Image (cartoon, grey):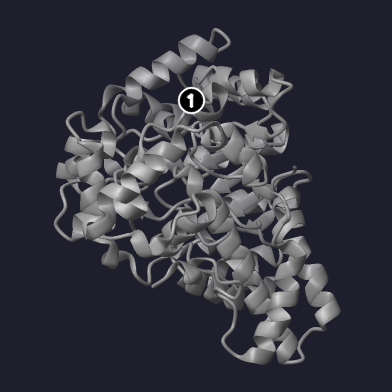
Amino acid sequence: MSASIAAHPDRLLPADPGTRSIARALLALVEDLPIVSPHGHVDARVLAENTPFPDPTGLLISPDHYVTRLLHANGVALADLGVGGAPDTDPREAWRIFCRHWGLFDGTASGYWLRSEFVNVFGIDDALIGAEHADELYDRLQSLVGQPEFRPRALFERFGLEVMATTDDPLDDLAAHARLAADRTFAGRVLPTFRPDAYVKFSGAGFAEKAHRLIDTAGDGSTGYAGYLHALQNRRAHFLAHGAVSADHGTLTARTLKLDAAEAGRLFEKGLRGEATAEEAEAFEASMTYQFARMAVEDGLVMTLHPGVHRNHSPETFARHGADSGHDIPFAMEYTRALQPLLADFGTAENFHLVLFTIDETVFSREIAPLAGFYPSVYVGAPWWFIDEPDAMLRFRSAVTGTAGFSRSSGFIDDTRAFCSIPARHDASRRTEASFLARLVAEHRISEERAAEIIVDVVDAAPRRAFKL
């Protein structure tokens, strides 16, 4: 492939000339709109400190598990790629490994994003990607990342980012967010997101220590389960004071339980002692999903739910490289019965927003779209993670639109740690939305005028609406 593919104006648009022409016109309405990114994993300190990115490997390879997991599947050791902060990694050699294996990414979403980054962010011909030009490409990128226009804040502005949410520990002091908010030279909004998973999952490393520290740091003087709930509510208030609009929950399943305080307290104490069974741990997490919804009704934080992933599937990899190292694997999910206790109490509550994400495509049309098509609180989360790619995004639109229309979706979320992939991912989403809407116009199912209104709403208004921006 040549660089002209990554820069081609018709990339991802329909092959049929008539439909493609409609898609071009729709894309033109949104292609240059600001990026609103309400869910992601870029560290706020990257922007607060605004230091140059270290090297091409640290920028484009090591933090991107979409890239490293496929290399690992083809025999590359993760330590050789700098995953998990591997101390002895040679970044240049890691780059050479990546270039030798570049062909693996043909047809993948990560390959599409990387091409777009090379061409549209760094101005590099993607024909240079490969073993023969590895050192030349590395040196070119290294010279660029040291320049002022490639520092994080300059890129933030060039990418057209208006809002970017991070994902943060409940006990984070949010100093980086405060620093950015107070800096009049920085015009963007970088919002923290409350992510309490480590304080809910009994099986997580150091759960008891984390829970005790939470109560001691943020509680109201009460102990046990009551002190735990108060501490979580207090930390949510801290996040709200620093601009947060949402809380994110990476639960095992979508199950919710309405337990009385005595039963929930009994499970909590067993979790602290390390005596809870797997069933009791899952029950406590399900009860906390219900409690977090109750808190969201009270304080207004949007609740996003990301269930259905077996985290750290490879024990050996987790032991060597830690979490988020590319081996979280999806499994089948169920939402209708699982969420009924929560939605029975809060589904029509004023000011409650619940955004449901999934990696199980079978539930989009069967469960999530019907739920969002009835409950005012429920929004359909955008295709996420393994289905954050053009073909899956088209399947998503086909699956949910017939039942829930366009108004009940969250808008696109990039869910990324790889900062430079943000514009590529949003561009792919916008092109996919234009393609889907163009087909509806070509089939005389909606007018071109109405499609023009919808695409602006889906790209720009939807994330603002769902995430209360």
Residue at 54% from the left image edge and 63% from the top image edge: 336
Residue at 53% from the left image edge and 26% from the top image edge: 50
Q: Is residue 158 visible to us here? A: yes
Residue 299 vs residue 63: left or right?
right
Residue 12's image quarter?
A: bottom right
Quarter of the image for the N terminus: give it. bottom left
Residue at 52% from the left image edge and 37% from the top image edge: 150
Crowding at mark 1 (Cα within 10 Å: few <14, some 14-19, many 20+): some
**Foreground of the two, 285 or 148:** 148
Amino acid under label 1? Thr
Residue furthest out toward the right: 449
Q: Is residue 405 above or below residue 235?
A: below
**Foreground of the two, 326 or 113:** 113
Residue 302 vs residue 173: left or right?
right
**Foreground of the two, 266 or 399:** 399
Label 1: state its secondary structure. Answer: loop
Residue 260 is situated, as x and y percent measured from the top left of the image, at 53, 34
The residue tagged 1 is 51
